[in-house]
Image (cartoon, helix red, strand yellow):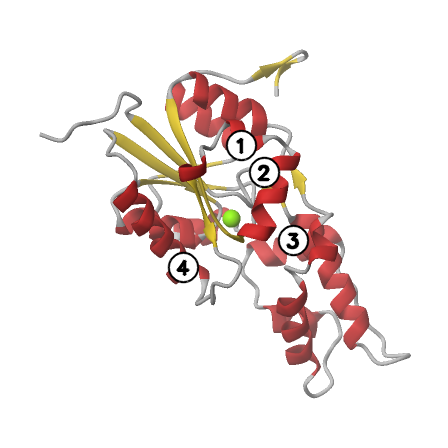
Amino acid sequence: MRNYQRSSKRLFTDFDGPLMDVSERYYQVYLYCLHQVRLPQQPIVQMSKEEFWSAKRAQVPEWKIGWESGLTLPGQAEDFARLRSETVHSPLFFQYDRLHDFAIPALEKLQEHGFDLAVMTMRRQKELYPVLNHFNLGRFFATDRIFCLRDDYKKRGDTKDKPQLMEKAIATLPPVEEQWIVGDTEADIIAGKRFRVKTIGILSGIRNEYQLRLHQPDRIKADLREVVAELTGDAIYNKIGAL
Ligand SMILES: [Mg+2]
């Protein structure tokens, strides 16, 4: 018989999406790339933040976002896509990220209910640790409950890298009776399913409901507040009532 640890429920949470709102960073990178690639005087059709984010959530490819924004000369859409992927993780743009208002109350509530909390993210160490420190999130995640990419890790794509992180987690953490992963993309759902961790697709990130449903998560929730309600039966309140 397996020797379960006292805290017998675990939640792996993805970082960007459930906890962080990265939409402004992605939009600022879009604007930067659009203006870098356009020729002087070339007419462009700049998307609003809402239009852009809804395209991202629908998984419209980067080159198509460039094309639809007016970068239709030969090679421009491809240049836009390349520059975008080179830029989106550059330090200058991380300043646009913000923590969702409900993130800390939700983590506190889960901790209160005895959940063993772990964070699992495709961020590199240098992109994660300063943010964990800035928001004092270390109180929720012990050092051996933080799963991210080494600074020198050669990325192969989220749907390959995330299951690898989960494999490491399952091999190193004590077994629990029940564990969940919550995340905003297919990579989180694939990682969970491969290791029999129950999956919650969350809509407070970079995929819309249609895209997430294609991967058949066990649950779909609007944001972490709904996850808390589902897993603990408890609600999150602040001074003015429910958040
Ligand atoms: Mg994410």
Q: Amino acid at mark 1?
A: Gly
Q: Quadrant of residue 45?
A: bottom right
Q: Secondary structure at mark 1?
A: helix
Q: CA distance from mark 1 to mark 4?
A: 23 Å
Instruction: Name the residue beneath numbered marker 1.
Output: 138
Instruction: Name the residue beneath numbered marker 4.
Output: 161
Instruction: Name the residue beneath numbered marker 2.
Output: 132
Q: Which is nearer the N-term, disc 2 or disc 3?
A: 3
Name the foreground residue: 38 vs 96. 96
Instruction: Name the residue beneath numbered marker 3.
Output: 53
Q: Hey, which residue is sitting farthest bottom in the picture?
A: 74
Q: CA distance from mark 2 to mark 3?
A: 25 Å
Q: Are marks 2 and 3 in contact (CB under 8 Å)?
A: no
Tag shown at residue 40: none
Q: Nearer the viewer, mark 1 or mark 4?
A: 1
Neighbourhood count class around disc 1 (C-alpha, 10 Å): few under 14, some 14–19, many 20 upward: some
x and y percentages locating residue 113 in the rendered image: 40, 17
Q: Is residue 43 left or right of residue 99?
A: right
Q: Amino acid at mark 4?
A: Asp
Q: CA distance from mark 1 to mark 2?
A: 6 Å
x and y percentages locating residue 184 in the rendered image: 49, 46
Q: Which is nearer the N-term, disc 1 or disc 4?
A: 1
Q: CA distance from mark 1 to mark 3?
A: 30 Å
